Image (cartoon, rainbow, N blue to C red):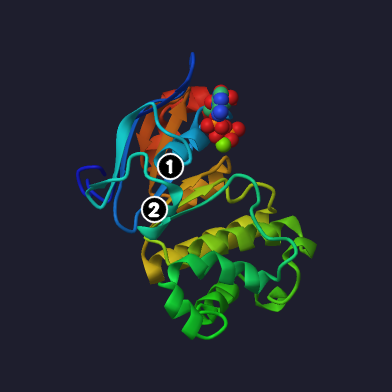
Amino acid sequence: MSATHPSFLAVRELRKHYGSIKAVDGISFDVGPSEIVGVIGPNGCGKTTLFNSILGQIEPTSGTVSFCEESITGKSPLDLSRRGIGRTFQSLQVFGKLSVRDNLLIAGQEFVGTMGRRLWMRPDAGLGERADELLELFHLKKVANKEAGCLAYGQQKLIDVAMAFMPAPRLVLLDEPCAGINASMVDELREILVTLNSTHGGSYVVIEHNMDFIMKLCPHIICMLEGRLLAEGTPEQIRADKHVLEAYLGN
Ligand SMILES: Nc1ncnc2c1ncn2[C@@H]1O[C@H](COP(=O)(O)OP(=O)(O)OP(=O)(O)O)[C@@H](O)[C@H]1O
Ligand SMILES: [Mg+2]
């Protein structure tokens, strides 16, 4: 896979050490344009730290990250979001007191251009159409005007993911989007991501413990163990990998 698209997102020998804890310890992988990559591995193996090191949330100990052939190592989250890179967090990040639609509008605010343009545009800064499109796709239209905090956890999780797509990102990193949502919603979310990917393009990197979701969604999977890359390949290759079975799927 790395040979096909070496330059969209390229992570090279990335490390994040906390004293003697090697949370991420020399990870390299590539993500191609419009590719969906899954990241699996047992609790505490460094998946979230990998995302945080890629996305400027924490400073990596060493290694490099480049996006579209430009170095983004250590760049701020704001800088990265302006380059078209978005993320979701492992924990829910919605504004509970705002309506579902306003949550989406806020998530797009940073990307509508200059202050002058924002001042002279419609009150929703032109983001309404995009918000409505995503509300429809994420099956949130009926609850668009409800307070987000009053909805079931699963629906709030969908809002969280939809918010990441408001700026029409070129790359999105999703940290456990299925955590806490029921099986039918997991299938729904997978279908939504497939639709978004095929209609709007964009690459996704998805951390998940839900194997069924990852195996069906991601043609390219990396498996981590203790901060390192244990295996990389197609779902079939990962399923058949002796080390993965021992370290993770066998658990
Ligand atoms: N700020 C920190 N200081 C010290 N150790 C940390 C810090 N952040 C993470 N770690 C350690 O780094 C390791 C990797 O943690 P991380 O949260 O990245 O794992 P994870 O694969 O995302 O786990 P999970 O599947 O449970 O979300 C763990 O041992 C964790 O305790
Ligand atoms: Mg994590």
Where disc 2 sits, the SS reads helix
170 left or right of 96? left
Earlier along the polypeptide chain: callout 1 or callout 2?
1
Q: Is residue 180 in view from this perspective?
A: yes
Q: Is residue 11 visible?
A: no
The percent coordinates of residue 68 (x first, y second) are: 25, 53
Q: Position of residue 67 (x, y in %)?
A: 29, 49
Q: Residue 207 vs residue 198: left or right? A: right
Seen at 51% across and 79% down, the residue is 125
Query: In terms of depth relative to the viewer, which is nearer, 18 or 225?
Result: 18
Q: Position of residue 209 (x, y in %)?
A: 57, 40
Q: Nearer the viewer, residue 129 or 153?
A: 129
Q: For residue 11, which numbered disc appears in the image?
A: none
Work out whether residue 36 or residue 183 is closer to the camera in this orientation and state it: 36
x and y, in percent, of residue 42 in the image: 55, 29
Quadrant the C terminus occupies: top right
- What's the residue type where badge 1 is placed? Gly
Q: Secondary structure at mark 1?
A: loop
Pointer 1 local density, CA inside 10 Å: few below 14, some 14–19, many at least 20: some
* Residue designated by label 2: 79
Do the residues under discs 1 and 2 have CB atoms within 8 angstroms?
yes
Is residue 45 left or right of 183 when viewed as pictured? left
CB of residue at label 2: within 8 Å of ligand 1? no
Q: Which mark identifies residue 56?
A: 1
> Which residue is located at x 43 percent, y 44 percent?
55
Label 2 Cα crowd, 10 Å radius (few <14 / some 14-19 / many 20+): few
Question: Ligand 2 shows up in which quadrant of the image?
Answer: top right
Is the residue 208 above or below the residue 114 in the image?
above
Query: Looking at the image, which residue sits at the far top?
Result: 20
> Residue drawn at (32%, 45%), measured in percent from left and top?
72
Q: Is residue 135 above or below residue 68?
A: below
Q: Quadrant of residue 234?
A: top left
